[in-house]
């Protein structure tokens, strides 16, 4: 059976589905079905997933910067708040890597995409960030997003890597996505967990090993460290695979929502979405082809 070539339409579908699957997983402190947060609503995240899919279908072969900007413009057309800036910044280079020709593994192709980023990509990404208006952004001494960038997008992200998990993924060749998130989804699915529970488990592993920088910006480094310790304790209790782990997850979710303002580990959620996308375009796609192959 001939391998079906991957197209921008298939990549767009994977991006949209990754967003929706992440939204359905029971992740403490994050928006989900029946689990809104002040100013952040489940319906807006569903609309935002559709916005990413629409932009990726139209501009799927565009460079990273224009693809990020097109996605945020489409999101702002549908939704009145920032719901997916981090997701878009992560999925755009991954989508380019999937479509990049050649037999090399996805992460190797991604590194080539990141190495090709230029000042035009930085300019468009900066415009997208300003349009999304993320909260708690602060100011940077070099390459501040409020001023025109003078270096490549990869160089700009590298400057922010110490204070932002999404920027750190660019600087590290998506280390969390490929060494924590994706392996966790694979391992938990192999153990027989449902996909929502596997995604929740991957989220907890990311949170335990990479303190959430959105929490740092809004609540301080101590709150982020305590959250990482809580996630690690849930994993030791079996995570979503065990009743005690599930009870601890529910308790953590209540504590995070009860805080004023609520504590929302949004960076970890963005990273698990990137991990899901990588899983969909690699493992899930191979499994689909295998099931369709004549016996």
Image (cartoon, grey):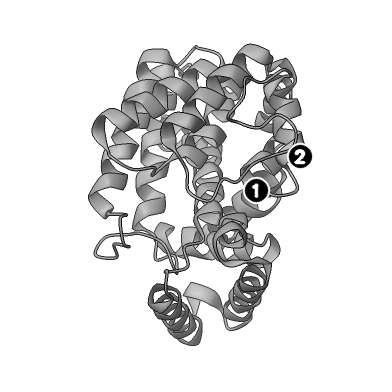
| Marks 1,2: beta carbons within 8 A | no
Q: Secondary structure at mark 2?
A: helix
Rendering coords of residue 95 (x, y %): 53, 25
Relative horizontal placement of residue 166, taking residue 111 as reference (left or right): left
Q: Secondary structure at mark 1?
A: helix
Q: Residues within 10 Å of mark 1 (few under 14, many from 20)?
A: many
Q: Residue at x 42, y 41 (%)?
A: 84
Q: Is residue 277 above or below residue 156?
A: below
Which of the marked residues, 1 or 2, is nearer the chain's N terminus?
1
Q: Residue at x 28, y 40 (%)?
A: 80
Q: Which residue is mark 1?
A: 165
Relative horizontal placement of residue 163, taking residue 64 as reference (left or right): right
Instruction: Confirm whether residue 284 shows in the render.
Output: no
Rendering coords of residue 10 (x, y %): 40, 24
The label nearer to you, 1 versus 2, is: 1
Q: Residue at x 49, y 75 (%)?
A: 241
Q: Is residue 133 above or below residue 102?
A: below
Q: Is residue 180 above or below residue 123?
A: below
Q: How far is disc 1 from disc 2 in space, using C-alphas? A: 10 Å
Relative horizontal placement of residue 171, taking residue 234 as reference (left or right): right
Rendering coords of residue 104 (x, y %): 71, 23
């Amino acid at each position: 059976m001939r391998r079906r070539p991957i197209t921008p339409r298939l990549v767009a579908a994977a991006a949209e589905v990754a967003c929706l699957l992440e939204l359905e997983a029971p992740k403490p402190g994050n928006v989900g079905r029946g689990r809104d947060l002040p100013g952040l609503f489940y319906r807006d995240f569903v609309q935002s997933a559709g916005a990413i899919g629409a932009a990726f279908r139209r501009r799927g072969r565009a460079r990273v910067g224009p693809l990020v900007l097109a996605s945020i413009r489409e999101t702002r057309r549908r939704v009145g708040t920032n719901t997916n800036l981090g997701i878009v910044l992560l999925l755009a280079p991954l989508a380019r890597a999937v479509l990049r020709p050649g037999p090399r593994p996805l992460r190797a192709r991604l590194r080539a995409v990141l190495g090709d980023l230029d000042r035009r990509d930085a300019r468009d990404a900066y415009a997208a960030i300003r349009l999304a208006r993320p909260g708690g952004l602060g100011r940077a001494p070099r390459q501040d997003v409020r001023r025109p960038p003078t270096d490549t997008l990869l160089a700009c992200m590298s400057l922010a890597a110490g204070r932002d998990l999404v920027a750190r993924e660019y600087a590290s060749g998506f280390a969390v996505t490929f060494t924590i998130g994706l392996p966790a989804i694979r391992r938990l699915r192999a153990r027989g967990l449902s996909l929502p529970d596997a995604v929740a488990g991957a989220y907890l592993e990311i949170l335990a090993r990479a303190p959430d920088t959105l929490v740092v910006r809004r609540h301080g480094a101590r709150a982020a460290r305590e959250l990482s310790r809580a996630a690690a304790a849930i994993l030791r209790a079996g995570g979503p695979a065990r009743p005690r782990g599930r009870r601890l997850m529910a308790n953590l979710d209540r504590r995070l929502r009860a805080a004023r303002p609520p504590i929302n580990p949004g960076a970890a959620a963005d990273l698990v979405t990137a991990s899901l996308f990588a899983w969909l375009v690699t493992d899930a796609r191979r499994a689909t082809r295998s099931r369709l192959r004549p016996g």
